[in-house]
Amino acid sequence: MKKHLKELKKQEKENRRKIGLPQEEESVLSDGEAIPQDLLKDKEALSPILEDENPQASLVDNFTWKDWFKISSFYIYGVVYMGARVLANVQSSLLIFYLQNVLGIAKGQTVVPIEFAIIPLIIYISSSITSSSLKPFYQKYGRKKVFVLGSVLSVTAAVVLMILNEHTKNVIYGLAIIIGASQSICLNTGISMISEVVGVRGKNAAFVFGSYSTLEKFANGIILYAIMNVRDVSTDENETYIRVCTSIIPAIAAVVACFFVLIGKASDYDSGDLVTEGANDDSEKIN
């Protein structure tokens, strides 16, 4: 095939030289041989050549959004993302009710206490600082270990939230730092692994992230709807219920996400030449 291409190219150059036409630009294979422009237009004739040069090219080009349902990583990291979002959203949504009805911060006050703004602000600042500092930890320890660390911090925060009361409520300021760090670690690390799984299939990335986003919104909506309707969280009469929902549910979400991270096949370390599971292990399933 390559010998035939070389002959065609020589003939094309000679014909153009005889009639005075400029030479066309060349597309070059990895071994330096050029592909004639007229052959480039014939995709059917060219496809065997390109497949020989890049065996994964055909797989990526023929990959559609339906093929995601045949890949185990699509489901595994969907659970990871959903768990990380449930951890962050449920905890953040119930935090104000926890501060008011469990720790009694707003008790006896006629105006909104400043603590309702300071504590979420501490969580946000902690989360932002942690997000900007994760890459060195990925490179040194690996993303799976970092995610495990985030899950451990989430469980630690849940235990402390379960035992805090009005007399120890000032601990919440330091605990807010741990909460922000744990949420950031789990969410950012989960998204990082999802991006790797998408990998070379950039054309279908919108479907993956769109599916995950829809899934987590339904999950969070159903969980919060159930929490709010089982019992009233706006009164201190249900203190234990509020305490459990604010701490235990996010902790369970973190542990479940951690389990799926550990069984997932995404590379553990960041590097410049990552290859996704779908481009290797799952290629046979697609074909």
Image: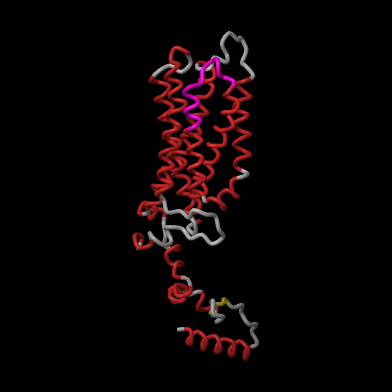
- Residues drawn in magenta: 156-170
Q: As displayed, is residue 201 above or below residue 57?
A: above
Query: Which x, y percent locates residue 241?
Result: 42, 19
Q: Residue at x 56, y 11 (%)?
A: 107
Examine the structure image and report whether residue 13 is included in the region drawn in magenta: no
Estimate the x, y position of residue 239 in percent, counting from the top left. Answer: 45, 16
> Which quadrant of the figure has residue 179?
top right
Quadrant showing the C terminus? bottom left
Residue 71, x across and y down, in percent: 37, 54
Left or right of 143? Residue 249 is left
Q: Quadrant of residue 113?
A: top right
Name the quarter where the N terminus is drawn. Answer: bottom left
Q: Residue at x 48, y 37 (%)?
A: 152
Name the dominant secondary structure of the magenta segment.
Answer: helix
At x 47% / y 26%, what residue is drawn?
Answer: 246
Seen in the picture, residue 66 relative to 221 is either above or below; the reply is below
| Camera-nearest residue between 158 and 195 | 158
Q: How many marks?
A: 0
- Seen at 51% across and 41% down, the residue is 149
